[in-house]
Amino acid sequence: MRRDSLWGSSVFRLVLGVFYGCLWTAAGMLLLSVALLFMQIPERMLMLAADCFWGLGAFMAGSRAGFHARRHGIRTGLLCGVLLCGILLSGGVHAGMVLSSRIGIRCGILLLAGICGGVRGVNRKITKPPY
């Protein structure tokens, strides 16, 4: 019997995708914090930008995991979105934030962006380098 390698594991693909999405989210939040240094941004605009960066991270996580899985894009993207929601909720609970409708809306954005990214990743063309 042949054992699957670690690279072929579906759990590893999801963890890799979520890590990739977290890097995109962190980069977006870093850009947002640099923008805050130089400009006065209203709180509502700040929350909207943070939601957009969380959505971008979920999209990229689903895209990366879907590209490596090459099948089940909706399921793969949904699982990436669920894992990122878990990260968001655990960070919010750790920071002492109250669960509100804003968190629910943000989790919905994460799930939808993860699904869209998973479908995009599965349908993305595999490019081979020229020889």
Image: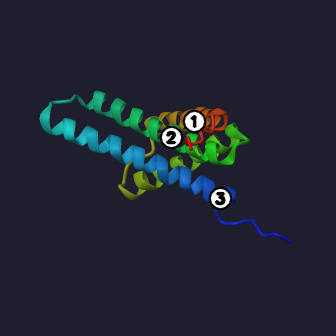
Report which residue position mark 1 lands on: 117
Label 2 – label 1 distance at C-alpha: 6 Å
**Residue 40 vertical position relative to residue 8 in the rendered view, above or below:** above
Looking at the image, do the residues carrying marks 2 and 1 touch, with CB atoms under 8 Å apart? yes
Identified by mark 1, the residue type is Gly
Q: Residue at x 65, y 58 (%)?
A: 11
Report which residue position mark 3 lands on: 11
Q: Residue at x 34, y 40 (%)?
A: 28
Q: Secondary structure at mark 3?
A: helix
Q: Residue at x 66, y 33 (%)?
A: 123
Q: Secondary structure at mark 2?
A: helix
Quick one: quadrant of the N terminus?
bottom right
Q: In the visual, does 39 lie left or right of 12? A: left
Q: Secondary structure at mark 1?
A: helix
Identified by mark 3, the residue type is Val
Q: Is residue 86 visible?
A: no
Quick one: quadrant of the C terminus?
top right
Q: Residue at x 74, y 65 (%)?
A: 4
| First reached walking from the N terminus: tag 3 or tag 2 | 3
Label 3 – label 1 distance at C-alpha: 17 Å
**Residue 18 vertical position relative to residue 105 in the rendered view, above or below:** below
Question: What x and y, as percent, mark residue 40?
Answer: 15, 30
Mark seen at residue 60:
2
| First reached walking from the N terminus: tag 2 or tag 1 | 2
